[in-house]
Amino acid sequence: MSHLDIALANAENGWPVFPVQADKTPEPGFMDWEHRATVNLGGIRRFWEQYPDALPAVAPGVVYRAVIDVDLKPGKPNGYESLSLHGIDLDATGVPAFTSLSGLGTHYYFAGRFPSVNHILPGVDRKSRGGYVVAAYPLPPIRSVAVAPPTLLAGGKVGTSTADEARYQGSASTWFAERAGRAVTPAVARAVKPFIAGEAFTGHEAMLRWQIHLVKLSTEGHGGVPEALGFGRDVWLESPHTSGEDPAQEWDVALDRAITKYGGTTR
């Protein structure tokens, strides 16, 4: 299929289309691409009459959809490793997925409209409102894209900067021993308070975020983190589980990763 054929097919399936250049920037006159992207087939043909070599791009946020763009580029962060660290397997979601134009990444299509965020995780972008993707491949009907993205990828940036990372070289047991016995600070008490009030973890991603938050509090000098994590583990084991994995192992593996990436020297 030609790029025009792909653009027309995607528009017929409900995706607003506009033309971009080989460097993935909008063609001249399309800087307001989010307003000019269209499903009108006649309009798209006129676009390609003006720019016959253009690549087709889609604006997912216009139709309340989002694309998670995972990259594996030389010398850049490995997006697949970033997702794995947070226990996220996008292939397991069953959503439409396509190889990016470079051949070095994957576009995963989800339902929902969010602000676009570059580097929501290292090597992972979210394209929705205010963002676009080069879709040089036929997309399915928009109504078939009905799965929401994982919770962690529906918010803001998560651990994306090197300042956010303080790698720890020892074991988790050593990390706990080094931090045990310190007085609980108000920040740690606030993190535990919902569980004392009877709340449960709402899923794997909520558990991951809470673990990382507590580990980072420890690196900032807050006391009571090992005890809070021990209490959180008990709450996790009693929370509802749908993954089929052993909850204790799921907790321990996730916490080991959080400590390794974020549990190093005090900042």
Image (cartoon, helix red, strand yellow):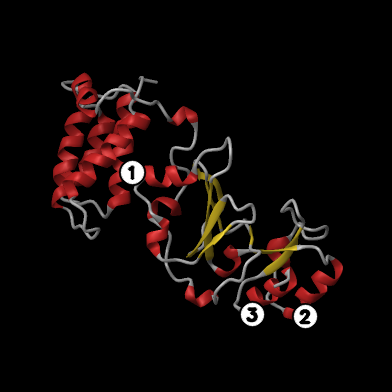
Image x and y of residue 84, in percent: 38, 46
Circle 2 is placed at which residue position? 42
Secondary structure at numbered mark 2: helix
Camera-side mark, 1 or 3: 3
CA separation, marks 1 and 3? 40 Å
Dot 1 amino acid type = Arg
Q: What's the residue at 33%, 27% (across, down)?
A: 263
User: Residue tagged by mark 1?
Assistant: 209
Which quarter of the rendered picture does the N terminus lie within? bottom right
Instruction: Name the residue rendered at 33%, 43% in the picture.
Output: 209
Q: Which is nearer the N-term, disc 2 or disc 3?
A: 3
Q: Distance between the residues labelled 2 and 3?
A: 11 Å
Which badge, 2 or 1, is on the more N-terminal residue? 2
Residue 20 visible to an observer of this rendering: yes
Query: Is 227 rendered above or below residue 20?
Result: above
Q: Quadrant of the C terminus?
A: top left
The crowding category of the residue bearing disc 1, from other C-alpha atoms within 10 Å (few below 14, some 14 to 19, many at least 20), is some
User: What residue would you read off at disc 3?
Assistant: 12
- Look at the numbered disc 3 and give the secondary structure of its residue: helix
For the question of whether residue 115 can be seen, the reply is no
Q: In which quarter of the image is residue 150?
A: bottom left
